[in-house]
Amino acid sequence: MSKYPVLKHINKEFRRNCSKVESYKYLYEPDVKCEILGSGNLSVLVVGNSYAYNHFDGIVYALKGRFSLARLYAINVQQKCGRLVNTTRDLILNTKPDLIFVISKHQPLMKMPLYTNGTDACIESLREFFDFASTNATAVFYPDPQIEFDYFVTYEMAKKIWMRAPLNVMNKRYETHLQETKNIYERLKQINCTNCFMFNWSGVHCQTGLCQAYEEELELPLFRDYDHVNRIGVAKLFNETKKTIDKALNFV
């Protein structure tokens, strides 16, 4: 695909490159795991839920030639949040990664109004975790609030094509996205660490003022459901992913 030449390198490539021998015994077994060996000297840890699984290939390819080991640990956060937190801490303390990528959907509590009459539990949890992670790594990365549509993009797009209906009504106004996620952004601003970096992925999807549900030129969806990007979506975000990683490595 000429518009996204990186696509062939991030099309679930890691499934074929995962090491057959694991170097670490996890505190709790994840839903998806992978270890890839590289020719560089950086140790990389990617943790989270299905979002981490989605973006792992893009992160690995952005770091091509610079990592010695890239590890993926992905688990269903809604069902096993405690396991993810405890295993992440265990991994950080015992494997001492240089780069940590915390790629997970921001949970519904993050959308609630900030608690102003005392301690906001979400802010305290964010600060405590990122203080811990940033103290034990060279750089820590996390995503901006995810775009959420009201429907499964792939199904909706197929239906509209079949009905010969316009596709552009599927897109979402950027202003709407910002309004829906304003409390998440406010909480993320409270992460006070100089070696923590946020990916501006929604800014890429919404750079025209509309959050694109599909690739207009190719007439292909960018999301596989209402909030998970597909392979084309990861490819669209790749330049932002690589730019943020490169900026962080130059800064630290």
Image (cartoon, rainbow, N blue to C red):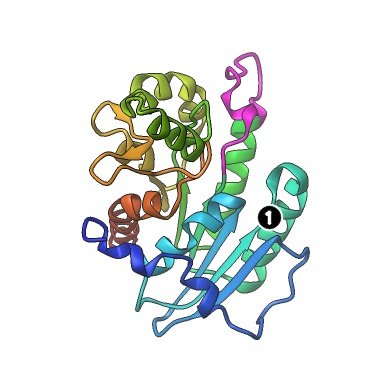
Amino acid on which the number 1 mark rests in the picture: Ile
Q: Is residue 159 magenta?
A: no
- 31 to 104, vertically: above or below: below
Give how far across and how far down residue 157 sits, in percent: 42, 35
The secondary structure making up most of the magenta span is loop
- 180 to 15, vertically: above or below: above
Q: Is residue 124 left or right of residue 62?
A: right
What segment is highlighted magenta in the picture?
A: 105-121
- 39 to 59, vertically: above or below: below
Q: Is residue 96 left or right of residue 68?
A: right
Of 15 and 139, nearer the camera is 15
Are there few (<14), some (14-19), or many (20+) residues within 10 Å of tag 1? many
* Image quadrant in which the C terminus is located: bottom left
Determine which residue is flagged by label 1. 75
* Image quadrant in which the N terminus is located: bottom left
Question: Is residue 184 in view from this perspective?
Answer: yes
Of 98 and 237, nearer the camera is 237
Give how far across and how far down residue 99 sits, in percent: 47, 64
Of 10 and 151, nearer the camera is 151
